[in-house]
């Protein structure tokens, strides 16, 4: 995967997961059998949740623009990876998979409250 696509996708994925660490992290760890007083320290990330969400959304917008701009870019020469329709479909599929994970990570505190509250 070219760097111009992978950095925003990875950044968006990591920021989306970081946005859910405060709320979903302790529940997931406890569900897996991991315990300890240190798990409650994950709630200290709650004030930074809006920042992580903003970073995730910005990174996803950058990835979206990079993927769709390269699809319509006329400077892509024959034989390059960007000229292959299969690679463009692959990038778009990866992008939408990352978007789904980020949306689930961002929505997880609300879903957990709905399911267990």
Image (cartoon, grey):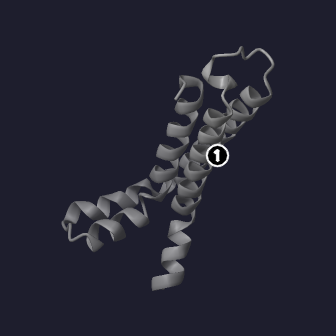
Q: Quadrant of residue 72?
A: top right
At numbered mark 1, what does the secondary structure look like: helix, strand or loop? helix
The relative height of residue 108 versus residue 73 in the rendered view (above or below) is below
Nearer-the-camera pick, 47 or 64: 64
Nearer-the-camera pick, 10 or 53: 10
Identify the residue at image location x=57%, y=34%: 8
Q: Residues within 10 Å of mark 1 (few under 14, many from 20)?
A: many
Identify the residue at image location x=45%, y=84%: 116
The relative height of residue 81 versus residue 68 in the rendered view (above or below) is above
Q: Quadrant of residue 27?
A: bottom left
Identify the residue at image location x=69%, y=24%: 83
The relative height of residue 3 versus residue 95 in the rendered view (above or below) is above
Nearer-the-camera pick, 32 or 75: 75
Point out the residue furthest to the front here.
Answer: 79
Q: In x, y percent, where is residue 78?
A: 70, 16
Horizontal arrangement in the rendering, residue 115 relative to residue 64 (left or right): left
Q: In x, y percent, where is residue 101?
A: 53, 56
The relative height of residue 108 versus residue 77 in the rendered view (above or below) is below
Q: In x, y percent, where is residue 73?
A: 78, 22
Q: In x, y percent, where is residue 9?
A: 55, 38
Horizontal arrangement in the rendering, residue 101 relative to residue 40 (left or right): right
Horizontal arrangement in the rendering, residue 85 relative to residue 48 (left or right): right
Q: Quadrant of residue 56?
A: top right
Number of on-image labels? 1
Residue under numbered circle 1: 57
Nearer-the-camera pick, 9 or 75: 75
């Amino acid at each position: 995967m070219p760097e111009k696509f992978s950095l925003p996708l990875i950044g968006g994925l990591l920021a989306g997961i970081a946005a859910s660490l405060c709320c979903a992290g302790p529940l997931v760890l406890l569900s897996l059998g991991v315990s300890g007083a240190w798990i409650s320290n994950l709630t200290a990330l709650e004030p930074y949740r809006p920042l992580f969400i903003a970073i995730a959304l910005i990174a996803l917008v950058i990835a979206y623009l990079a993927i769709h701009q390269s699809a319509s870019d006329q400077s892509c020469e024959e034989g390059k990876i960007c000229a292959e329709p299969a690679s463009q479909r692959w990038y778009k599929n990866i992008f939408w998979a990352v978007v789904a994970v980020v949306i689930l990570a961002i929505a997880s505190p609300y879903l957990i409250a709905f399911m267990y509250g």
